[in-house]
Image (tube, rainbow, N blue to C red):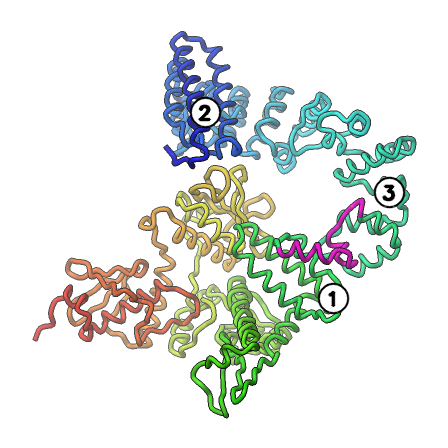
């Protein structure tokens, strides 16, 4: 039984009692051999479960608490409908209730742990088995995914077995059926569409589809039938639109308003503007209705001038547009309120508001950066749309402030932030904010002497909060550059032009961090910024470039020997290459398939790395754009939506549209970064932490350790696979590079766990990247500690080690 919140316990108990009564009846009917009554009862049980599972009733807590009821139902139906041939898929499916024993046999038929209907769909299509296809479309043992449904309907039509009842039943079971048919360019679409129109006329409403013809629109306007809003949005031809305009000219104003309302939903109400007396407002109306983002400020202003003040007001009443109204300065208060509530359209429109007296582009830019900080606290997909809304607001602000593009606005404002003097004078004290590349500090002088800390006299001064605010701005600037721009450049092997590089170097953070990265110049030279030609575009080096040239180990050693702390992982970044298995499967990878992860944690991790996560009905519930116009697409198995429960990862493909491309044709940098994302998800979100240890994480630490060994001349340490072997004076130790656990030869475990171990690094430890990686610090600190075990003084460690011979 699953834990039930108190508020739902009474309802769940009531529903369980009702279902137990149905299970009792099922047992009686099975004993009597009444199959027809059992078939009707199965439908009643399903309806009862579905209504009882609804959120307003039980909060979705019913299904998890009826396993015993389902077992009783299974027994009754297995008794009344015995399996005659366990190899006959159609016979196994042809039962009104999906019993567990039949589901297990179906899973065996398709050779998987759990039954998936898609393999049987394809087998039925190949054999021309109409009965099996009809049974699969019932979905009693699991609904096929929409693409498989489209293939099944096409096959039934080719066999002459597609009828109206099948289409009607399939529409009811698959809300996104028409989209699946469109995506598949299914040959059965004309027949399905004709059936759908008849369903509309009879009062049914196939979901996510509109009827066709003027008859539906007239019925919606005059008769006000059920679902009038659906009928009134029927697809019309140009001739039908012209006929509608003529007809409305003879109708009362209420019908005209109703028609305009309905056709606004359909997206073609502009054809009715002459009936409303708005012949000069077409451009403005179209901008309000379909204005594409980003909005063109000059275009909005010109369209409003053409319409005139009075018609502009009427058009905005007919077709409200937050962005257009903001560009005309009509809704400042409403937009500012929407921004406070993180409304995406409000954030985008905020950038279009005219600058008020005393308001500067910098002040609005700074405010939008504060708004952007709220994004990571939102849901997995919401954070993407929130960030996109902020970016759109900056594009709009650039137009308002007279900059050619958002990048120029950003460089200008960031430079102003960095160069704005922040000084506080108080008596003998002078306090300033000093930017030191990746950080910013408040420094205080007294009579020309630098103080070690900020005295209370300055902390209590009314001007001190302004200093702290400026300090935070500079820190944010450095953080954005490191985790945003530089991480993106390295992850995509991105390029910067000389002009862009010069602007970045003017910022304190840029001046401090850019020289620590490796760059590839136009002549093909790889080196630090001081060693390459900056007069032409530069490409941020990805470890793939070093691997391809055979210089990865060389540059890792150089970075360590030169004590270069890179702002992001670059030389020691995990590199994922195609495996022999992936070359054999060609267009998909199963490297991380069958790993079970926590859905909520996995969704957050993927979202933070640019993935969009969906629901169980998506063929690929996790997708991410990949350079080159491709999409990384991950199959998953889970219930509901991504964060509801555990997720079992499936195969990964790289799609060009809907077609999987050979993995060998994918840019190696893009492939590596996608696999790096998935490795992180399995490592961090895995439901069994001991079941998986990332081999690439261990390899990365091994590479770092190898570079340190060469640099520090650690003759006692060698690397053997995922283990560092340390030959100390007291013993030989094996340190696992993923977990940090220490094995003591010849047998035993060494526990090295002072309370704060790893938080204070070993004096000789150097990490050549700024990323937070506590485990790497812990592992390397242990290795360095054990390589000098004769100097260990901690009694808790010494008590576990052999004594040094005297």
User: CA separation, marks 2 and 3?
Assistant: 54 Å
User: Disc 2 marks which residue?
Assistant: 15
2 or 3: mark nearer the eye? 2
Q: Which residues are magenta?
A: 317-340
Residue 387 is situated, as x and y percent measured from the top left of the image, at 59, 57
Residue 223 is a magenta residue: no
Say if residue 455 shows up in the picture.
Answer: yes
Above or below — where is 478 with respect to 353?
A: below
> Foreground residue, 586 or 220?
220
User: CA separation, marks 1 and 3?
Assistant: 33 Å
Q: Residues within 10 Å of mark 1 (few under 14, many from 20)?
A: some
Of pointers 2 and 3, the one earlier in the residue sequence:
2
Above or below — where is 259 with respect to 665?
A: above
Instruction: Return the residue found at the far top.
Output: 32
Q: Split into 4 quadrants, where in the image is the N terminus?
A: top left
Marks 1 & 3, CB-CB < 8 Å contact: no
User: Disc 3 marks which residue?
Assistant: 273
Residue in the image at 50% along x and 38% along y: 640
Of pointers 1 and 3, the one earlier in the residue sequence:
3
Label 2, secondary structure: give it: helix
User: Disc 1 marks which residue?
Assistant: 355
Say if residue 239 shows up in the picture.
Answer: no
Q: Residues within 10 Å of mark 2 (few under 14, many from 20)?
A: many
Q: Which mark is residue 179?
A: none
């Amino acid at each position: 039984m699953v834990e039930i919140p108190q508020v739902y316990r009474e309802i769940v108990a009531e529903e369980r009692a009702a279902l137990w009564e149905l299970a009792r009846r099922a047992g009686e009917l099975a004993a009597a051999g009444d199959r027809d009554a059992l078939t009707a009862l199965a439908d009643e049980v399903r309806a009862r479960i579905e209504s009882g599972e609804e959120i307003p009733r039980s909060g979705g807590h019913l299904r998890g608490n009826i396993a015993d009821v389902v077992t009783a139902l299974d027994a009754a139906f297995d008794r009344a409908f015995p399996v005659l041939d366990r190899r006959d898929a159609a016979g196994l499916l042809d039962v009104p209730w999906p019993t567990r024993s039949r589901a297990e046999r179906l899973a065996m038929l398709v050779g998987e742990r759990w039954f998936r209907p898609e393999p049987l769909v394809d087998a039925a299509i190949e054999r021309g088995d109409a009965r099996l296809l009809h049974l699969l479309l019932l979905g009693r043992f699991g609904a096929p995914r929409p693409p498989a449904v489209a293939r099944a309907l096409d096959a039934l039509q080719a066999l002459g077995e597609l009828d109206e009842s099948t289409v009607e039943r399939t529409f009811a079971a698959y809300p996104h059926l028409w989209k699946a048919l469109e995506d598949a360019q299914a040959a059965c679409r004309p027949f399905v569409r004709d059936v759908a129109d008849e369903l509309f006329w009879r009062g049914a409403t196939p979901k996510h589809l509109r009827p066709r013809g003027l008859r539906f629109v007239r019925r919606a306007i005059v008769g006000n039938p059920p679902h009038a809003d659906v009928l009134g949005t029927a697809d019309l031809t140009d001739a039908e639109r012209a006929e509608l305009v003529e007809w409305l000219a003879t109708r009362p104003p209420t019908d005209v308003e109703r028609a305009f309302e309905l056709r606004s939903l359909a997206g073609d109400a502009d054809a009715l503007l002459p009936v409303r007396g708005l012949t000069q407002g077409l451009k403005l109306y179209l901008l309000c209705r379909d204005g594409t983002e980003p909005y063109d400020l000059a275009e909005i202003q010109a369209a409003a001038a053409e319409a005139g003040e009075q018609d502009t007001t009427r058009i905005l009443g007919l077709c409200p547009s937050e962005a257009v109204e903001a560009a005309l300065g009509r809704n400042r208060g409403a937009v500012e309120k929407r921004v406070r509530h993180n409304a995406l359209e409000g954030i985008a429109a905020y950038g279009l508001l005219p600058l008020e007296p005393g308001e500067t582009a910098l002040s609005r830019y700074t405010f939008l950066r504060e708004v952007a900080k709220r994004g990571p606290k939102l849901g997995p997909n919401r954070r993407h749309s929130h960030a996109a809304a902020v970016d759109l607001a900056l594009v709009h602000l650039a137009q308002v402030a007279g900059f050619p593009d958002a990048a120029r606005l950003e460089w200008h404002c960031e430079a102003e932030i960095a160069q704005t003097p922040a000084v506080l004078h108080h008596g003998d004290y002078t306090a300033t904010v000093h930017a030191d590349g990746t950080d910013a500090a408040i420094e205080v002088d007294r009579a020309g002497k630098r103080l070690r800390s900020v005295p209370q006299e300055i902390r209590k001064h009314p001007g001190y909060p302004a200093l702290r605010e400026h300090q935070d701005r500079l820190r944010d600037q450095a953080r954005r550059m490191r985790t945003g721009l530089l991480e993106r450049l390295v992850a995509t092997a991105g390029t910067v032009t000389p002009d862009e590089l010069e602007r970045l170097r003017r910022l304190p953070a840029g001046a401090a961090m850019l020289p620590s990265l490796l760059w590839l110049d136009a002549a093909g030279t790889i080196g630090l910024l001081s060693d390459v030609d900056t007069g032409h575009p530069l490409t941020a080096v990805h470890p793939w470039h070093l691997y391809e040239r055979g210089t990865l180990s060389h540059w890792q050693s150089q970075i360590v020997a030169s004590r270069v702390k890179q702002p992001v992982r670059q030389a020691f970044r995990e590199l994922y290459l195609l495996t022999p298995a992936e070359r054999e499967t060609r267009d998909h990878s199963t490297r991380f398939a069958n790993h079970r992860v926590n859905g909520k944690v996995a969704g957050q991790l993927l979202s933070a790395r640019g993935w969009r996560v969906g629901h169980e009905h998506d063929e690929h519930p996790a997708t991410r754009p990949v350079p080159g116009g491709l999409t990384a697409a991950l199959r998953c198995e889970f219930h509901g939506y991504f964060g509801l429960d555990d997720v079992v990862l499936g195969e990964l493909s790289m799609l060009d549209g809907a077609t999987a491309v050979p993995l060998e044709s994918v840019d190696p940098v893009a492939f590596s970064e996608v696999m790096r994302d998935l490795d992180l998800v399995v490592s961090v979100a895995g439901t069994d932490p001991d079941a998986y240890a990332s081999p690439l994480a261990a390899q990365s630490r091994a590479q770092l350790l190898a570079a340190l060994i060469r640099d520090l001349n650690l003759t006692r340490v060698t690397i053997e696979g995922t283990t560092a072997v340390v030959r100390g004076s007291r013993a030989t130790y094996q340190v696992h590079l993923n977990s940090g656990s220490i094995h003591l030869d010849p047998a035993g475990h060494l526990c090295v766990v002072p309370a704060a171990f790893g938080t204070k690094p070993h004096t000789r430890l150097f990490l050549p990247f700024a990323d937070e990686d506590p485990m790497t610090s812990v592992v390397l600190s242990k290795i360095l500690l054990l390589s000098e075990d004769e100097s260990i003084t901690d009694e808790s460690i010494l008590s576990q080690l052999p004594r040094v011979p005297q």
